Amino acid sequence: VQLQASGGGLVQPGGSLRLSCKVSGLTLENYAIGWFRQAPGKEREGLVCMHGSDGKTWDADSLKGRFTISKDNAKNVFYLQMDDLQSDDTAVYYCATNPPTKGCGLMVVDGSLELSSDYESWGQGTLVTVSS
């Protein structure tokens, strides 16, 4: 299984960017998919996911609805649409997949839902820099 993330780059504050994750070696249709990021000096953070079974999505409250996950089963590609980007969105962004038996991997931490990093397959990461 290989995941190849692309689409990162430099964007101004308030701008938008769409990341892509091309998947090979598995059929994406029934797999859970997720996007994560890691900023310098910080732990990896789960952002959004989509269940493979029913297409339901989850996104972190901290994102305030600015990020959207989607996929194209025919192309075996999934995406992260990011809007109203701010400087603290600067990070390396990673895509990941999980088999149907594991799903999105949401867990309750201190009363809130968070995305587990326990995904089976990962892309190499793409750097997003938000700066004027």
Image (cartoon, helix red, strand yellow):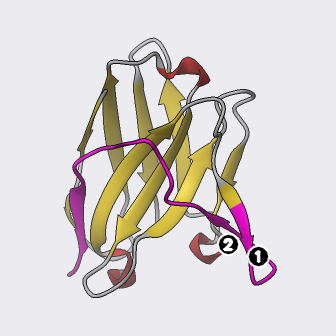
The image quadrant where one finds the N terminus is top left
Q: Is residue 48 above or below residue 3?
A: below
User: Which amino acid, by three-letter code, is at mark 1?
Assistant: Ser
Circle 2 residue? 61
Q: Residue furthest right?
A: 111
Q: Is residue 1 magenta?
A: no
Instruction: Tell me the magenta residue range.
Output: 107-132
Q: Is residue 65 left or right of residue 123?
A: right
Q: Residue furthest bottom?
A: 41
Picture coordinates of residue 96 (x, y %)? Answer: 42, 44
Circle 1 residue? 112
* Contact between labelled residues 2 and 1, with CB atoms less than 8 Å apart: yes
Picture coordinates of residue 123 (x, y %)? Answer: 29, 44
Picture residue at 50% right of the left edge, 47% below the top: 34
User: Which amino acid, by three-letter code, is at mark 2?
Assistant: Asp
The image quadrant where one finds the C terminus is bottom left
Which of 94/109 is in front?
109
Q: Is residue 38 above or below residue 88?
A: above
Q: Is residue 1 left or right of residue 96?
A: left
Q: How many marks?
A: 2
Picture coordinates of residue 49 (x, y %)? Answer: 59, 48
Neighbourhood count class around disc 1 (C-alpha, 10 Å): few under 14, some 14–19, many 20 upward: few
Q: CA distance from mark 1 to mark 2?
A: 9 Å
Neighbourhood count class around disc 2 (C-alpha, 10 Å): few under 14, some 14–19, many 20 upward: few
Which element type, helix, strand or loop, lies under badge 1? strand
Picture coordinates of residue 98 (x, y %)? Answer: 52, 38
Q: Quadrant of residue 106?
A: bottom right
Which of 130/24 is in front?
24
Picture residue at 56% right of the left edge, 19% below the top: 29
N-terminal of the pair, mark 1 or mark 2, is 2
